[in-house]
Amino acid sequence: MNEQNIYIVRCGEIALKGMNKPYFEKTLVDRIRKNLKGLTGVEVKRQEGLIFIRSDKSCPSEEITKPVSKVFGVASISPAVEAPSDLEKIGEAAVEFMKKQIEELGIKTFKVEAKRADKTFPVKSPDIAKIIGAKVLIGCKVLKVDVHNPDCRLFIDLRGDRTYIYDEKISGFGGLPLGTNGKGMVLLSGGIDSPVAAWMMAKRGMILEAVHFHSYPYTSPRARQKVEELAEIVSSYSGKMKMHVINLLPIQEEIVMNCPEEETTILVRRFMMRIAEKMAEKTGCMMLITGENLGQVASQTAEALVVTDNCVSMPVMRPLIAMDKVDIMDKAKEIGTYEKSIEPYEDCCTVFLPKHPATKPKLYQIEASESKLDVEKLVEAAVKSSETVWIDL
Ligand code: ATP
Ligand code: MG
């Protein structure tokens, strides 16, 4: 038997990259190493378009598969055993492997699926499957073959002089490795949407930084704590990240005192965008990211989004723009942010919420209202007051 446990990691979309493929693969390997850095005796290596992880026998499989399946760029991971590419030896290893599956999972039926990466191997894949299947039947008397609905699919993957045997493919999220697509500033609230939006951009390889606005003392320290905890969940995928925390209350008070009530929400949103843009420029972020979603609330009508965008020159990414709320909620559940998001704490957007917010704001009217404020000074003061915390799980 093997001295070490072996895992096969498949890279999904990276396989489609042309000239840049080695760069993406190398970045992915680095990310996998980073996610496994707490473990000793782990080796991560690129080989033939796959990534192989070897770990000490004593290291439980979950400690490898869980963190690796959270690395963006990983399509799937399989705990495997290795044998020399010799049908006798493969057969022996397959029998051993299946004995363990019978003992641990109580399987009764199986099907062999064989694949040759190396077409010079003298036996064709269907014949390899038949030969290994017969050896397993002899070695494990309790098993029967079921080609339609087996308890266990036994994969035999021949690669050069080594063969890998496994029965499960634990799905990753796919996407591209972190760090392959610039850096973005996410406007992170305590709601359901923005953590999902952040996660989706990180999944495409973007490094994240976050900005959060509160209205202390109208919003509580516990509400801020909740956002930090939410950011921690996001960072378990997107890596250690900086979060800038800013009190928006002085701006909100200015708006409430000087501008029409129904415009409060859109005016506040424009300030958020301006401040986020300034923070982004300072920290080398190329774009802003929000959890906005077409038509969800008054500030997210087509008209409102156009007026919001107009105050910044940086591109604003809205990955949830065309999703339905139920689908966003499902995604939030899948990535583990939902339960935290629905904890009932105040948000700065609900402070000074107008009774009838404008759903079709006109840019000239909004600009006229803003002319009563010293926009630049207010933005500058907010940026200056920002407090930075490192978010790391
Ligand atoms: P979410 O679930 O993300 O809070 P929402 O449906 O409640 O979204 P809004 O409150 O209108 O929508 O916010 C729209 C977007 O503006 C959010 O997705 C987020 O990107 C940003 N945003 C809202 N509130 C804050 C905040 N307190 N701090 C930082 N960004 C915010
Ligand atoms: Mg919100």
Image: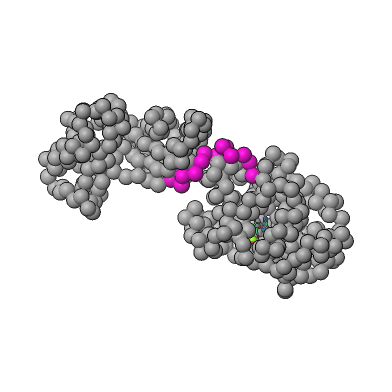
Location of residue 97 with respect to 258 vertically, above or below? above
Between residue 182 and residue 390, name the one nearer to us: 182
Location of residue 303 with respect to 14 vertically, above or below? below
Q: Residue at x 85, y 51 (%)?
A: 377
Q: Is residue 17 left or right of residue 185?
A: left
Evaluate whether residue 247 shows in this view. Answer: no
Task: Specify the quadrant of the image occupied by residue 225.
Answer: bottom right
Task: Specify the quadrant of the image occupied by residue 90.
Answer: top left
Confirm whether the magenta stretch covers residue 277: no
Q: Is residue 221 left or right of residue 322?
A: right
Q: What percent of the width, then of the height, locates residue 142?
A: 14, 48
Q: Residue at x 64, y 66 (%)?
A: 297
Q: Residue at x 46, y 47 (%)?
A: 173
Q: Residue at x 29, y 43 (%)?
A: 167
Q: Count all numbered tags in the image, as a single digit.
A: 0
Q: Is residue 246 left or right of residue 38?
A: right
Q: What percent of the width, then of the height, locates residue 310?
A: 75, 55
Confirm whether the magenta stretch covers residue 173: yes
Q: Is residue 160 left or right of residue 218?
A: left
State the extent of the magenta-drawn residues as a range. Answer: 172-184
Between residue 312 and residue 136, name the one nearer to us: 312
Q: What percent of the width, then of the height, locates residue 242?
A: 65, 43
Residue lying at the far bottom in this picture: please name it.
Answer: 355
Please name the colour scheme applied to the rendered image: one colour
Between residue 338 and residue 124, name the one nearer to us: 124
Q: What percent of the width, then of the height, locates residue 117?
A: 31, 32
